[in-house]
């Protein structure tokens, strides 16, 4: 299962690979041991999977020639005892490919075919406000949108995007979305350039053709 979109994938999820990495056990280990030592620390690293005999072992933490927090029997293999001097190989395994594959597919699903979920086909979306809103510079403000953008279906999907605010003096400000109540409202914090207690309404928006709320889906990263 991919980590995205619930969380961001880490090295532990995607695994770390090493080139030409092979060493040997400095001491034997039992089938239940959760630490091991090798001859050369250059061949192991945190979040690497090594193969010893027919068992794969995930190295949760590495310091020098010592590995701890082992996950034994990784990838469906069987935990077993291994003798001192047994080869320790950091081979690329199926998980290296499949974890990335799953994350890429999850990202593509979130973006949608043709990036339609991110609104790239129409970079600016405009909606009328459900009612007048007073905006004060530096003060978080909840704005109800009606209709609410159909593409925003989860509380975190548009965080990091912007709302374009038109004030009563004809000026604009791009304001970062800091919170979302899907289907209902967004929370923004205008900067000092927004006149104090500026009132923005749907009527003003329609008359001036300066939408009070335009979600620009152009900043993802």
Image: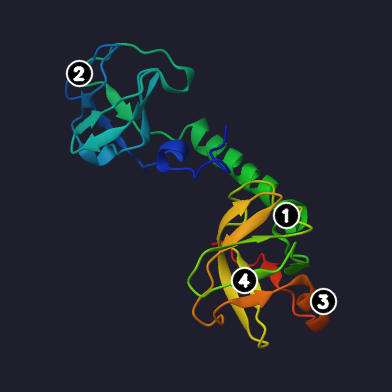
Q: How far, Cα to Cα, is label 4 from label 2?
A: 73 Å
The kind of secondary structure element at disc 4 is strand
**Left or right for 118, reference 68:** right
Q: Which residue is mark 2?
A: 84
How far across and down, in percent of the image, does residue 17 sit? Answer: 40, 41
First-in-chain label (1 vs 4): 1
Q: Nearer the viewer, mark 1 or mark 3?
A: 3
* Nearer mark to the viewer, of 1 and 4: 4
Rounded to the nearest angstrom, the CA distance separating label 2 from label 3 is 78 Å
- Residues under labels 1 and 3: Cα distance? 26 Å
Density class for disc 4 (Cα within 10 Å; few <14, some 14-19, many ≥20) is few
At x 64%, y 86%, the residue is 171
What residue does disc 3 label?
206
Visible in this render: residue 16?
A: no
Against 3, is 167 above or below? below
Mark 2 / mark 3, whichever is N-terminal? 2
Question: Which is closer to the viewer, label 2 or label 3?
Answer: 3
Which residue in the protein does label 4 denote?
Answer: 134
Label 4, label 3: how far apart the Cα atoms are = 17 Å
């Amino acid at each position: 299962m991919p980590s995205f979109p619930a969380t961001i994938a880490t090295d532990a999820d995607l695994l770390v690979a090493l080139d030409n990495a092979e060493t040997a056990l400095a001491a034997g280990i039992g089938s239940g041991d959760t630490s091991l030592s090798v001859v050369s620390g250059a061949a192991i690293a945190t979040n690497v999977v090594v193969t010893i005999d027919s068992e794969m072992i995930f190295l949760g933490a590495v310091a020098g020639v010592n590995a701890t927090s082992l996950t034994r029997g990784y990838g469906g293999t069987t935990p077993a005892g291994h003798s001192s001097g047994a080869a320790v190989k950091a081979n690329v395994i199926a998980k290296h490919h499949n974890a990335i594959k799953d994350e890429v597919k999850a990202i593509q699903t979130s973006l949608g075919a043709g990036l339609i979920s991110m609104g790239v086909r129409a970079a600016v979306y405009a909606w009328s406000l459900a009612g007048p809103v007073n905006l004060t510079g530096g003060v978080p403000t909840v704005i109800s949108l009606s209709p609410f953008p159909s593409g925003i279906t989860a509380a975190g999907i548009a965080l990091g995007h912007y709302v374009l605010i038109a004030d009563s003096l004809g000026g604009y400000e791009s304001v970062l979305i800091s919170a979302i109540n899907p289907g209902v409202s967004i929370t923004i914090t205008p900067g000092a350039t927004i006149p104090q207690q500026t009132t923005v309404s749907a009527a003003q928006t329609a008359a001036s053709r300066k939408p009070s709320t335009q979600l620009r889906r152009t900043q993802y990263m």
